[in-house]
Image (cartoon, grey):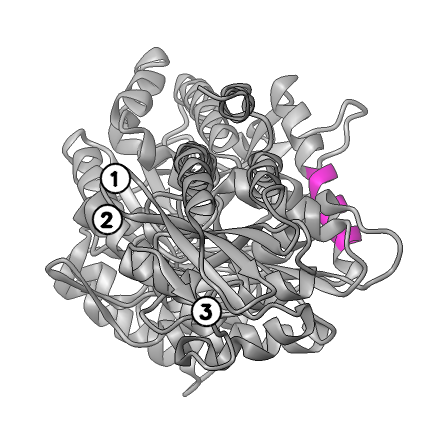
Amino acid sequence: MTQFERLILGMIARDEAAEATAEQICRRGQSFTDDVLCSMVTVDRAGHLHPFAGPGLPPTYSAALDGIPIGPHVGSCGSAAFLRQPVAVTDIFADHRWGPYRRLAEPLGMKACWSSPILAGNGRPLGAFGFYYRDHRGPNRGEEELVAECVGLSAILLDRWERSAEVERLAVVDGLTGFGNRTGFERALHQVSLGRGAAALLLADVDGLRRINDAFGHATGDRLIREVARRLRRAVPHARLFRITAGTFALLIEGADVGVGLSRIAARIAGAMRPPAWCGPHLLAPAVTCGAATFDGQAERDPERLRQDADLALRQAKETARGGFVCFRPERAAAAIRRRQGMQAAARALAEDRLEAHYQPIVRLGTRQVIGVEALCRLRTPDGRLLPSGHLAEALRSPSNASLVTDRMLARVARDVRAWLDQGIHLQHVGVNLSQADFRQGDLVARITAALAQYDVPRHLVVLEVTETVELDDGGRTVGTAIERLRNAGLRVALDDFGTGYASLAHLLDIQVDIVKTDKSLMRRFAVGDTGEVLLTALLQMADGLGFQLLAEGVETAAQAIRLEQLGCPLAQGFLFGPPRTAAVTAALLPRAAPAGSH
């Protein structure tokens, strides 16, 4: 082994920079004679050339070769790599293989080029080692021996470098889509933040992915993700794309017009998602919701702030424009801060057990008698004030908070109902709201029956209200099964907020319930011949056929109550009959003897 071989192999073993080692190999070739320049190029797995080392060659020359596909007529290096054999061109300006590249060689004074392929053990081209001559000639015997030494060392170097590069690439690449993963996104976002021009971060979240995974399995969900990724690449080819969570993609977009162009980009994405896609045996309709934020090119470029702003825009889009696009604006940050503060205040109230059950009366319209109540959660501050209901809504965005609220409410309601029964109060209806999180846990029946059993409360008194926050658009498979189990356990179920949100006529066919509660907004359109009255009349006819009772919610005027009674609506709830009150105040409104008949 020569001293030079020991030097190069030592550099490789110590994992010194591959480019620096390649420079040493090239300088070794150039040391043989004064009229030679040496270069080393790599060949990626797609068959494209990339400059790697070339002491003495100007950067403009190397850059011009970057990305050129190898082939039998691509200069000396491209041809040698493609043919996997040495190629000697003794006259660059006469050889057809150099036709498109002569303009690059002429300023260097190079007249000939001899190139040798650098091959992996399986014969795949890793690169090429080139000799550039200032005379019209090919290699002599001494140069052939020298290049054989250099090519052998280069093969070891490039094989090791390629393996290391592949390991590093896999560390930042998402295996499902080929996009960058979260680690790659973190690095790229930091690099973008160091730049000076305008840049944007657009987040695209796949709508309904969890429901698709639940309904058809994760293999189908993965096919959908790959299809969405393919369409994103086609719609925004200039963006750097990453998959940062199961169903969320991040697009880094740079350029002077990103601010005005984001809405157009989002529109292209929406259009690309529009055609249905076969994901295995299932025909699905891909859809994404997008939120974005921008760097404006000013000095302050905080990557974490950009990510938070884009995430805030995405959350708002999910809430208000599902399937659409929202771009962050500074005024939205103040609203987000207020929401977070409200959520934190509600979470503290839960942790400190400051939750109360307040009850709103439910009346039989024919007699105006209070026959039941709906339990509504209220949170009280340490100084005795009740928090606005919006604070609780923010707290319920957390599944753990939502389940905790349900458990606390069940305990409070069961305790209050037991106290009323012990006082000789008889009622027929105690409504308790359920959240989406309650259905996901899988132990809903056990939780409810245990809470009622602790206070010996009869199950038939409880009506579990499935609110508009519970997703029912999976054909009732998930929630419908849970509702069936609740009813089989002797509990009753109401479909709440009917006529808005997720509730629709189709759900009455998929899910059997005991009561349907109309949405409060129906009362705002409740006049003779108006849409509210038309819908309510149709629901009353359906109630007879499907076996449920109708309860009109949001009744605020005597005229509304009279008209509801004329149409035959049996039950009503609203501020006309009383606002939510504490258990003690509510007890005075409830009858002390069982009302005649049943509702």
Of the residues tagged 2 and 3, which is closer to the observer? 3
Q: Position of residue 271 (x, y in %)?
A: 42, 78
- Residue holding disc 3: 90
Q: Nearer the viewer, residue 587 or 112?
A: 112
Q: Are marks 2 and 3 in contact (CB under 8 Å)?
A: no
Q: Residue at x 31, y 56 (%)?
A: 226
Q: Against 458, is 529 above or below? A: below
Residue 487, quarter of the rendered image: top left
- Residue holding disc 2: 514
Q: Residue at x 74, y 38 (%)?
A: 341
Q: Nearer the viewer, residue 180 or 334?
A: 180
Which secondary structure lies at badge 2? loop
Q: What amino acid is found at the position of numbered circle 3 in the picture?
A: Thr
The residues bearing labels 1 and 2 have C-alpha atoms spaced at a distance of 6 Å
Residue 567, quarter of the rendered image: bottom left
Q: Position of residue 245 (x, y in %)?
A: 45, 43
Q: Are marks 1 and 3 in contact (CB under 8 Å)?
A: no
Q: Can residue 525 be seen by looking at this rendering?
A: no
Q: Position of residue 512 (x, y in %)?
A: 18, 51
Q: What amino acid is found at the position of numbered circle 2 in the picture?
A: Asp
Residue 231, quarter of the rendered image: bottom left
The residues bearing labels 1 and 3 have C-alpha atoms spaced at a distance of 92 Å
Which secondary structure lies at badge 3? loop
